[in-house]
């Protein structure tokens, strides 16, 4: 072999070696985690030789959700939940996968308005769950729309679907425990822009009110251990605050809070303190029932059988100025608005055993237009 030929072969060898090292570095980079345990990724990365990352859809304490092209499903776009490489979140993901598998078993045709899990896998210590791709959450849409509330018709259609989805869970001995507008996603969130001359601004109206329920990471079967505190603060039922034990009715209370927020554009209970939260409830719904007060271990919130609350403090004034009896939040004196508040009163009943069941809620007169449309069409017509 001549010198020229030798150097040519040697150079090819070096180029190949560099390429291998470069490829190795890319692979190493692709499975690197940040300080919090999030997978470090970039658009174009491919997981499992299947999921091509398009971009980030959202982030939470659990990890991140990314949009991917699924090359094994005809290049369809899906949502991939990538859990942090942290044991407690990985364990929570395993529990969520168990719930989602049960949902898929009970609802193979995906008719009950719970997001459908397509696949799951462990990617270098990151539990990953793929889902059908949905659109904006009902909270994010409202936020991007300057917290403009939804119309009474949109509230009705979303409420009916939420009640159907959560009833399906309850019928299968599950409690969601973390219902909130962030966990209710539009199937499509395209919208029409309407100019409001009074406020001199453009306002968005979502074109379809079809929604699905997501995030089953805290969902609990009836037979499983029930942790003392559940639900995000603003949607937390009184029996949870008072540590009286909880079951499916705590979801019903959360639904009531969500529907109020859809209707008014802001949360009913804007607080981070238990005593203040109870004071707000009393301002909106009247006194906490004496039976609940007698049973609770949280006697520090009460004095002589009544809530220990001073209305003359700054906190007392805040509650008085920001909360009022429920019916005083009605925006219009028409029958459908009053029917809506009649439904809310049933959903936001203090005592869990007296709270409206979702079966009864779905029969409420407020939903008559939806039921009539279903009957007329011969199928569920709940998307508009």
Image (spheres, rainbow, N blue to C red):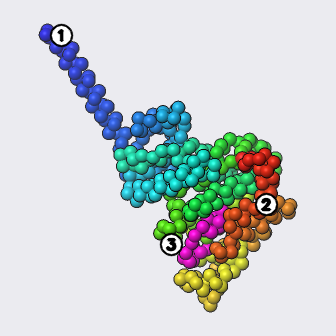
The residue tagged with tag 1: helix, strand or loop? helix
First-in-chain label (2 vs 1): 1
Alpha-carbon distance for marks 3 and 1?
78 Å
Where does the image place residue 371, in percent across and percent down from the top left? Answer: 78, 54
Q: Which one is closest to the eye, mark 2 or mark 3?
A: 2
Where does the image place residue 215, in percent across and percent down from the top left? Answer: 54, 54
Instruction: Return the residue at label 2.
Output: 366
Residue 181 falls within the magenta-colored stretch: no
Residue 242 falls within the magenta-colored stretch: yes
Res. 51 in view: yes
In the rendered structure, the answer to whether residue 126 lies left or right of residue 79 reads left
The residue tagged with tag 3: helix, strand or loop? loop
Q: What's drawn in magenta, residue-wise?
A: 238-256
Where does the image place residue 336, in percent across and percent down from the top left? Answer: 82, 60
Alpha-carbon distance for marks 2 and 3?
34 Å
Q: Residue at x 50, y 52 (%)?
A: 101
> In which quadrant of the rendered view does residue 324 lie?
bottom right
In the rendered structure, the answer to whether residue 285 lies left or right of residue 40 reads right
Where does the image place residue 53, in percent across and percent down from the top left? Answer: 47, 38
Is 97 above or below relative to 29?
A: below
Instruction: Return the residue at label 1.
Output: 4
Q: Nearer the viewer, residue 275 or 71?
A: 71
Q: Nearer the viewer, residue 315 or 50?
A: 50
Q: Residue at x 60, y 62 (%)?
A: 170
> In which quadrant of the rendered view does residue 307 lie?
bottom right
Q: Residues within 10 Å of mark 3 (few under 14, many from 20)?
A: few
Instruction: Return the residue at label 3.
Output: 228
Is 285 above or below relative to 231?
A: below
């Amino acid at each position: 072999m001549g010198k020229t030929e030798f150097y040519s072969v040697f150079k090819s060898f070096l180029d190949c070696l560099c390429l291998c090292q470069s490829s190795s570095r890319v692979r190493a980079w692709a499975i690197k985690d940040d300080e919090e345990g999030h997978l470090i990724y970039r658009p174009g990365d491919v997981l499992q030789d299947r999921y091509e990352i398009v971009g980030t859809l959202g982030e939470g304490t659990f990890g991140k959700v990314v949009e991917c092209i699924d090359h094994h499903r005809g290049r369809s776009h899906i949502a991939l939940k990538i859990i942090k490489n942290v044991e407690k979140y990985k364990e929570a993901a395993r529990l969520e996968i168990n719930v989602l598998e049960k949902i898929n078993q009970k609802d193979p045709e995906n008719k009950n308005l719970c997001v459908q899990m397509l696949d799951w896998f462990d990617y270098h210590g990151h539990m990953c769950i793929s889902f059908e791709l949905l659109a904006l959450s009902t909270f994010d849409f409202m936020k991007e729309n300057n917290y403009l509330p939804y119309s009474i018709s949109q509230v009705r259609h979303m409420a009916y679907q939420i009640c159907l989805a959560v009833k399906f869970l309850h019928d299968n001995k599950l409690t969601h425990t973390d219902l909130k507008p962030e966990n209710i996603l539009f199937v499509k969130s395209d919208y029409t822009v309407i100019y409001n001359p009074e406020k001199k601004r453009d306002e968005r109206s979502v074109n379809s009110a079809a929604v699905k329920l997501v995030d089953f990471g805290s969902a609990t079967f009836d037979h499983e251990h029930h942790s003392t505190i559940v639900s995000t603060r603003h949607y937390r039922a009184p029996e949870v605050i008072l540590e009286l034990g909880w079951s499916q009715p705590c979801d019903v209370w959360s639904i009531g809070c969500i529907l109020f927020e859809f209707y008014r554009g802001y949360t009913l209970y804007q607080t981070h303190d238990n005593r203040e939260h109870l004071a707000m409830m009393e301002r909106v719904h009247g006194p906490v029932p004496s039976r609940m007060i007698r049973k609770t271990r949280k006697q520090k919130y009460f004095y002589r059988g009544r809530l220990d609350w001073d209305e003359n403090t700054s906190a007392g004034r805040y509650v008085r100025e920001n909360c009022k009896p429920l019916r005083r939040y009605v925006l219009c004196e028409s029958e459908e608005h009053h029917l809506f508040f009649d439904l809310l009163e049933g959903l936001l009943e203090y005592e869990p055993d007296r709270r409206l069941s979702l079966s009864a809620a779905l029969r409420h007169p407020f939903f008559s237009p939806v039921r009539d449309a279903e009957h007329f069409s011969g199928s569920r017509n709940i998307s508009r």
